[in-house]
């Protein structure tokens, strides 16, 4: 088995070198340079994630003309969809994730609308499977999970109206946008953010693979997104909590439902991040707001019940005394024990 693995690693190393040579000999110099950066970031070497230098080289492509960013995303997607290696697929996704987190807008925009453009599952990795050995098979589940997380990251950015990790988006501007939003808009965005957290919670059971440096870096980068999403949820839930007195029952049930879904993710997230992103203040606010919403719903429903009972009692009185005007209380007859003469 060990001999077979060594032979496979050697074959993959030779394949990487051949791909680099082919790209280097291309007559289209601008294309070959971009593809070389992509190939160097997404080798078959299992033990390490793409180096900082190789990621920086890919991101630097976004500083060029509009054609180069398109070539870069096309090259990454082509590499991702043609490979049968779980390691290469994870590295492609990791590189794309770096584009989303810290890439220039030229690259982000090309990724957001890729390709031809409108497929919901644009990474198309829900059936990815590398069964070359047990570890590759386990890594395949991480590829499927990571692709779905990355898709949710882009979806959340579209819902919010700005990129999730965009440091140029000032906190004051975010707060202004949130405070001026309607309840319906706030709830819509909370739903999208909760969906992202739920997707993270669907992490594969093979958590022991975090000892793999590549998987560890993937989880670290996802953790950064998770912290950003916590901040976005916190901002909106805190505002909704303050507006709760004016909510109707439908809005209350919607909010309580989203917060309940969020709470169900807690245990899985703790296992994944090993308390690195626990943030007790966030979870305390989620629980307290949910309980307040439940109490407010019961209060409103209790008032409804009182009105219904009162209305039914009045209706019963009218039905037994047709001579009363609508809403007129029925006089209570005075009892007399005098003898009728």
Image (cartoon, grey):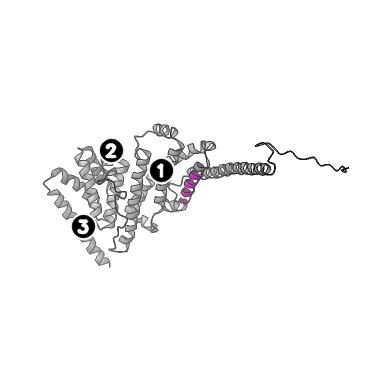
For the residues labelled 3 and 2, the Cα–Cα distance comes to: 33 Å
- Which residue does the image show at 20% across and 55% down from the upper left? 16
Please identify the dominant SS of the magenta region: helix
Q: Which residues are magenta?
A: 252-266
Residue 69 found in image quarter: top left
- Residue at the location (21% across, 38% down)? 66
Disc marking residue 307: none
Looking at marks 3 and 2 on the same chain, the residue that comes earlier in the sequence is marked by 3
Question: Which dot marks residue 105?
Answer: 2
Q: Is there a contact, CB below 8 Å, between mark 3 and mark 2?
A: no
x then y, percent, for residue 190: 43, 42
**Quadrant into which the C terminus falls:** top right
Residue farthest toward the front in the current orientation of the protein: 341
**Tag 2 secondary structure:** helix
CA distance for labels 1 and 3 = 38 Å
Left or right: 45 in relation to 340: left
């Amino acid at each position: 088995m060990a001999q077979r693995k060594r032979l496979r690693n050697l074959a993959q190393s030779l394949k990487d070198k051949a791909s680099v040579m082919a790209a280097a000999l291309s007559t289209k110099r601008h294309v070959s340079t971009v593809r070389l950066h992509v190939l160097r970031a997404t080798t078959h070497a299992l033990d390490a994630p793409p180096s900082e230098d190789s990621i920086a080289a890919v991101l630097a492509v976004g500083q060029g003309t509009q054609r180069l960013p398109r070539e870069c995303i096309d090259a990454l997607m082509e590499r991702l969809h043609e490979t049968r290696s779980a390691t290469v697929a994870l590295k492609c996704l990791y590189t794309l994730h770096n584009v989303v987190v810290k890439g220039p807008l030229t690259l982000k925009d090309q990724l957001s609308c890729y390709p031809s453009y409108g497929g919901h599952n644009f990474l198309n990795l829900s059936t990815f499977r590398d069964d070359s050995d047990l570890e590759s098979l386990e890594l395949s589940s991480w590829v499927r999970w990571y692709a779905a997380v990355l898709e949710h990251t882009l979806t959340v950015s579209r819902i919010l109206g700005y990129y999730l990790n965009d440091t140029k988006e000032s906190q004051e501007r975010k707060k202004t946008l949130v405070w001026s939003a309607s309840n319906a808009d706030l709830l819509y965005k909370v739903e999208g953010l909760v969906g992202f957290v739920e997707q993270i919670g669907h992490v594969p059971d093979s958590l022991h693979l975090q000892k793999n440096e590549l998987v560890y870096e993937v989880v670290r980068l996802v953790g950064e997104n998770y912290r950003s999403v916590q901040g976005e949820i916190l901002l909106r839930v805190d505002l909704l909590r303050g507006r709760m007195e004016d909510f109707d029952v439908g809005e209350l049930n919607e909010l309580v439902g989203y917060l309940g879904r969020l709470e169900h993710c807690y245990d899985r997230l703790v296992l994944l991040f090993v308390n690195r992103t626990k943030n007790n203040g966030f979870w305390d606010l989620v629980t307290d707001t949910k309980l307040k919403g439940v109490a407010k719903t019961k209060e409103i429903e209790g008032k409804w019940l009182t009105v219904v009972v009162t209305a039914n009692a009045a209706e019963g009185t009218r039905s037994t005394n047709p001579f009363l005007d609508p809403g007129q209380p029925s006089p209570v007859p005075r009892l007399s024990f005098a003898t009728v003469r």
